[in-house]
Image (cartoon, rainbow, N blue to C red):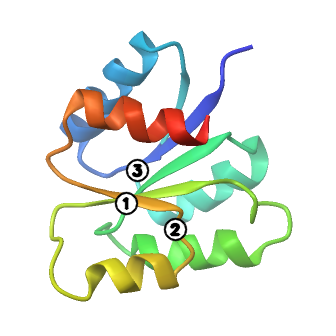
Amino acid sequence: MPKRILIVEDNMINYRLAGIVLRKAGYEILHAGDAEQGIVIARAEYPDLVLMDIHLPGMDGLTAIRILKEDPATRRIPIVALTALAMKGDEESIFAAGCDAYLSKPIGHQTLIEVVGRFL
């Protein structure tokens, strides 16, 4: 059974590109277009990994990460933050929220596979 990755990403181009790369690598992909939907899917499906965009409409990705990491049912799911705006202090905020790693956009295909491979 392939490992399942939940991609929480509101930009459909970014989602499709990551999905294509990860499907070709043999992973099953789940998708949420916002943080609230991502939390619902993570709690229902228990993916093996979550790729969480930080800048989402409505609830931001850091808040969603905190919620998932505080929930005993989802706290063990590794979460990799995705951010286009890696500024000073962002790394500390990302790890303080409970992320296991982060990637700066645009993400290279090989880098994505390598980081996902570390957790799966």
Q: CA distance from mark 1 to mark 3?
A: 19 Å
> Is any part of residue 20 visible from this angle?
yes
Kindly indicate whether the residue at mark 3 contacts the one at mark 1 (C-beta within 8 angstroms): no
At which x and y percent is residue 89?
A: 25, 88
Of callouts 2 and 3, the N-terminal one: 3
Q: Secondary structure at mark 3?
A: loop
Kindly indicate whether the residue at mark 1 contacts the one at mark 2 (C-beta within 8 angstroms): yes
Identify the residue position indicated by label 1 in the image: 102
| Image quarter hosting the N terminus | top right
At which x and y percent is residue 115?
A: 42, 41
Disc 2 residue type?
Answer: Cys
Residue at 62% across / 61% down in the picture? 39
Q: Secondary structure at mark 1?
A: strand
Identify the residue position indicated by label 2 in the image: 99
Q: Residues within 10 Å of mark 3 (few under 14, many from 20)?
A: some
> Is any part of residue 59 visible from this angle?
no
Disc 3 residue type?
Answer: Gly
Kindly indicate whether the residue at mark 3 contacts the one at mark 2 (C-beta within 8 angstroms): no
Q: Secondary structure at mark 2?
A: loop
| Image quarter hosting the C terminus | top right
Disc 1 residue type?
Answer: Tyr
Report the mark closest to the observer, 1 or 3: 1
Report the mark closest to the observer, 2 or 3: 2
Identify the image quadrant of residue 38: bottom right
The one of 94 and 39 positioned closer to us in this rendering: 94
Identify the residue position indicated by label 3 in the image: 33
Residue at 33% across / 21% down in the picture? 21
Q: CA distance from mark 2 to mark 1?
A: 7 Å
Q: Is residue 61 left or right of residue 85?
A: right
**How many marks can you see?**
3
Residue at 51% across / 32% down in the picture? 117
Q: Residues within 10 Å of mark 1 (few under 14, many from 20)?
A: many
